[in-house]
Image: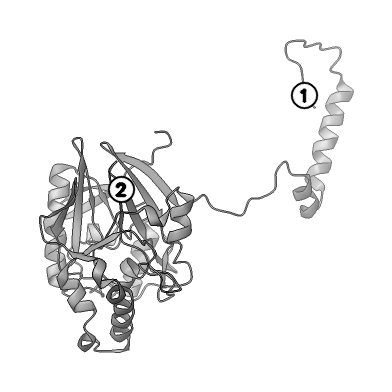
Amino acid sequence: MGVDVKNWNSDAFSRRDVLAMAATASAASLAPPALRQAMAKAPLQNMLAPAWYRFKIGSFEATVVSDGPIVLGPPQSDLLKGVSKEEFARVLADNFLRSDNVLLEQNVLVVNTGSELVLFDTGSGSAKMFGDKVGRLIPTLQGAGFDPKDFDAVILTHTHPDHCWGLLGATGAPAFPNARIYLTRADLDFWTDESKGSDDFMKAMIAGTRAQLLPLRERLTFIRDGQEIVSGIQAIAAPGHTVGHTVFMISSSGQSLLNAGDLAHHQVLSTERPQLEFAFDTDGKQAVASRMRIFDMLAAQRIPMLGYHFAWPGIGYLARQGAAFRYFPAPMQTAP
């Protein structure tokens, strides 16, 4: 029931009207839940917003696209070496994060330079090694307006399953049929070497990586430290997590963003305790040295970073905090 304020007439709005309105409201509040839902103005949507986020780096257009979160289950001791499962759970709870199930995002970056369309990493593909919520990259790219055949380059930070197992589709056909694939020779050699399969887990990782990379051998291009892969995108060696792990500085019109890959895995623990080694590092001490060196650079120069596994969409800044760092998520833009 509406009231015309411009033509308000107190005589026309009687005590009877007020009582009728009150009775209607009271009846609605006493109705059964199912009936109240039926009377609701709009139904519940029960769906999330599309998992992509677009922003600018100078004249470049960048888009973060999700491949879905990796579900690791309850906190475990030594996922970050030296941290017990109880301490891990406490740190998560203290930071208002779920302490019963550790989630790591997969923030895949697309950069359109104006002349080349570049994809960094490809997510987990159809494999379910990291849970059933992964493998969403292709439909999410399409939802963000990208056709996989339009990519000119796929740049791999490293060749772990959650970064390169989306190179081939479920049928074995290339997911990005017109793209050159850039990676380090060191990572290709290590993660396709069957002699490195020291246990069942390593054997599965190597077998899966061989299946993704070796059929595409003719389309692989090896990169080196300091190389400009395409105009405005420079490789920076950051080994340790894998032997050839590489991060990428993306620069345009005086602005920069570092795509940090797996330089760090958690926006709280890996920044406030940067000396912690990660369980899946090939060389944990080398990974820590790479992290400290690049974190120092980012903090000193106030350059934003994209953390592949940080909370969505993974873009933020680092500031020195004693011997460690604090991560400040960048506000998401709601208008261009």
Q: Residues within 10 Å of mark 1 (few under 14, many from 20)?
A: few
Answer yes or no: do the residues labelled 1 and 2 have beta carbons within 8 Å? no
Occupied quadrant, residue 121: bottom left
Q: Is residue 143 left or right of residue 164?
A: right
- Residue 111, disc: 2
Res. 243 visible in picture? no
| Placement of 98 over or under 230, stated as above or below | below
- Residue 35, disc: none
Q: Residues within 10 Å of mark 2 (few under 14, many from 20)?
A: many
Give the alpha-carbon distance from disc 1 to disc 2, as whole Å. 51 Å
Q: Quadrant of the N terminus?
A: top right
Q: Amino acid at mark 2?
A: Val
Q: Residue at x 12, y 55 (%)?
A: 227
- The residue that disc 1 covers is 2
Q: Quadrant of the C terminus?
A: top left
Camera-side residue: 331 or 215? 215
| Dot 1 or dot 2, earlier in sequence | 1
Q: Amino acid at mark 1?
A: Gly
Q: Residue at x 41, y 70 (%)?
A: 173
